Image: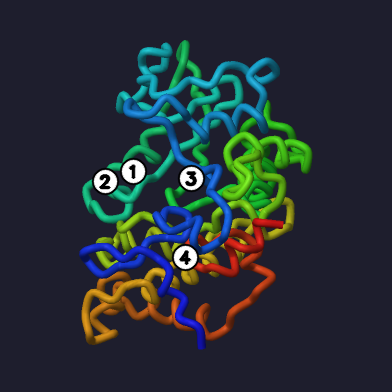
Amino acid sequence: MKNNHIERFISVDKIYTTYDKTRNFKAIFKIKKKGDTGSLTAGSKKTKSDPLKEIIKIFIPENKYGKIQVKKKIRSLGYDAKSNIEPDYFLENLGLIFEFDGPDHYNDSIKVMKDERKYQNLKYIKKNGKNIPIRIIRIPYYFQLTKNVAKFIFKDLIIHFSKELKNLPTSGFYSDDKFKKAISKVYNNIFSGKPAETEYEIPSCGLHTSQRFPSEFTEKGIEKLLNDFDFSIETNNKLIKAPKCIEHQYMWSLKYIIDDIKTYENPEENVRLVLPTWHKKFMYKYNFNIKNKDEKLLKCLFTRDKESILKTKY
């Protein structure tokens, strides 16, 4: 069997680099790398780009639904709130907030508790003496904008919230044209550097270069992660569920990471670097997904899998 690691650079910690980041890219693929894949992340003070805002603007145009308020204290916008919350992205005209949950929202118990309190406090917001309904859509840091994820966020959840937020369209915001425009804005083909056109060019949900593994999550953080996977809610006699591909891709991204770690001679120690082996439910889900691989749920880019990279070349 051909060694999947032999051509890649390995760090001092004995962890193989992802194929898209390796210094040996040209030697491996016989072509110069012309672009980075891109990622679904929120903007920060360190970066000028804000991929998540760009995506929201495409699905929910500001010229039609109003300006997206980014990192604005809720009281500075004229609201009477129990706590002066600072939403990541607030669409005032719709009563809709998008929150980007980075790793700290899973490995910091205080952060998890503050999130819970934030959601509770949003129930008590007023403006000009009137109660204002607000709803939150969370975007975990391991999400990527695959088609199923886009439909879940901009169609299923919007349809659900439209029962309480009257300015939301009852059919949601999703369309295939918007999806194609969004992925071309945020993602690139690694070989050509051109805007992405297919899901094969989009990184999978899960972890790629990040080393913020679930092994470091608190118990509440792991419960939050598992609740992400198992999310379901009934709307108009229809059950809305988180796409199965999110969990499946997440677990397979961990499997590829574990395969790339050679830090310890004992393989079990390398597993413990990545997985919370003490958590029974998580480990059950991990083992189930790895034993029951479904290629239909993995039609995207895994940066630690050479065959996955090669699919984007064509």
**Mark 2: which amino acid?**
Lys
Decide which of tag 3 and tag 2 comes sooner along the chain.
Answer: 2
Mark 1 highlights which residue? Answer: 115
**Mark 3: which amino acid?**
Ile
- Figure quadrant of the C terminus: bottom right
Residue 306 x/y as whole percent: 54, 68
- Real-space Cα separation, disc 4 to disc 1, in angstroms: 32 Å
Residue 139 badge: 3
State left or right for residue 46 relative to residue 307: left
In this rendered view, identify the residue nearer to me: 241 or 122: 241
Q: Residue at x 71, y 41 (%)?
A: 179
Tag 1 secondary structure: helix
Mark 4 highlights which residue? Answer: 304
- Real-space Cα separation, disc 3 to disc 1, in angstroms: 13 Å
Mark 2 highlights which residue? Answer: 111
Tag 2 secondary structure: helix
**Do the CB atoms of the residues marked 4 and 3 lie less than 8 Å apart?**
no
Q: Residue at x 67, y 23 (%)?
A: 61
- Real-space Cα separation, disc 2 to disc 1, in angstroms: 6 Å
Q: Residue at x 42, y 31 (%)?
A: 43
Decide which of tag 4 and tag 3 comes sooner along the chain.
Answer: 3
- Real-space Cα separation, disc 4 to disc 3, in angstroms: 23 Å
Tag 3 secondary structure: strand
Residue 32 x/y as whole percent: 54, 49
Decide which of tag 4 and tag 2 comes sooner along the chain.
Answer: 2
Give the image quarter of residue 12.
Answer: bottom left
- Real-space Cα separation, disc 4 to disc 2, in angstroms: 30 Å
